[in-house]
Image (cartoon, rainbow, N blue to C red):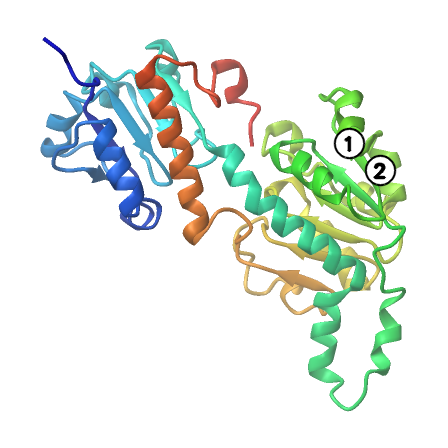
Amino acid sequence: MTHGPRRPQALLVMEPEHFRVQFGPAQLDRLDRLVGLADPVSTAELDSPAVRRRLREVEVLLTSWGCPPLTTERLAAAPDLRAIFHGAGSVRSFVTDEVWRRGILVTTAADENAIPVAEFTVAAIVFAGKKAPFLAQDAREHRDDWSYLSRRGELTNRGRTIGVAGFSRVGRRVVDRLRGMDVTVLVYDPYVDPAEVAAAGGRHVGLPELLRASDVLSLHVPELGSTHHLIGAAELAMLRDGATVVNTARGSVLDTAALERECATGRLDAILDVTDPEPLPADSVLYDLPNVMITPHIAGSLGSETRRMSDSALDELERYLSGHPPRAAVTPDTFGKSA
């Protein structure tokens, strides 16, 4: 007697809007071939009687943004749970110590989420060299001629020095993508092997050296206690006049009040996709400064980009079912260090 492939019961846990965007027909068809699904297929809560009944039989969770914390009580309702495949980035908002105590496998699609962030960051760096966002603001007021071009300094990317703070998933990709440009790339990260930085095309330096040399400072450190206000008033003061601060990491790694003061003088420019707080208060001076560009946290995966992460989670699910080791496991050791 032959048996088909094993099909464990699975439940998707995420906000409804993320389920709709991340799981199109191709992803749902693939999921249906790999696991058993029942009603509900997807949920944003884990406490209703219907969902608790489903939890009793599931072996696998596929999660994304909006997954509630996996508390001891909720995990007790899922005695057969063996694996969590996260179709997004950080798992810190919902993975608890009880998950590790139970030995549950956890994987992340953070590598895939890093791709659009790196793309956005490199675009921001190129725009910073040409002062494009700030000249676009100037154009609203100077409609009769282009004489304002000369007020933003030299508009070039050739020969610039780019400082990358944090050789993270995103930071590594940014350094790699800058390799084809005629720029010098400096990298600050106290936890990385300088040889890895060199192999990617950068040069490993201390933070003060990076700050003093950079025309563009790009932030890629995780949000940890040790990185809170990593770039504060003293660090911003080290940047050369006309430098641009690019933040696509976390708002808290940059001292907002200190940045407001520097940008208000016109000495520094900023391109911010994340802020602290997020969004900024309505009266923040950063909204009104012509040398600041703010976007509403759009660098990460959005729209069809999110399906790249769903596909990654499904790849991990396939490896799990076939007995192969995961490619992007999160462990208790790496849990507190990831962005």
Q: Residue at x 56, y 50 (%)?
A: 299
Q: Dot 2, crowdedness within 10 Å: few (<14), some or many (≥20)?
A: many
Position of 170 compared to 185: left or right?
left
Evaluate if marks 2 and 1 touch, with contact meaning CB atoms under 8 Å apart. Answer: yes
Question: In screen coordinates, is 289 left or right of 152?
Answer: left
- Of residue 269 and residue 327, the one placed in the foreground of this image is 327
**Residue 302 on image: x %, y %:** 45, 51
Query: Is residue 146 among the parts visible in the rendering?
Result: yes
Q: Is residue 324 above or below residue 283?
A: above
- The residue labelled by disc 1 is 188
Going from the N terminus, do you reach mark 2 or mark 1 first?
1
Residue drawn at point x = 85 percent, y = 60 percent = 156
Which mark identifies residue 210?
Answer: 2
In percent of width and height, residue 57 lies at 15, 20
Q: Which quadrant holds the N terminus? A: top left
Q: In which quarter of the image is residue 272?
A: bottom right
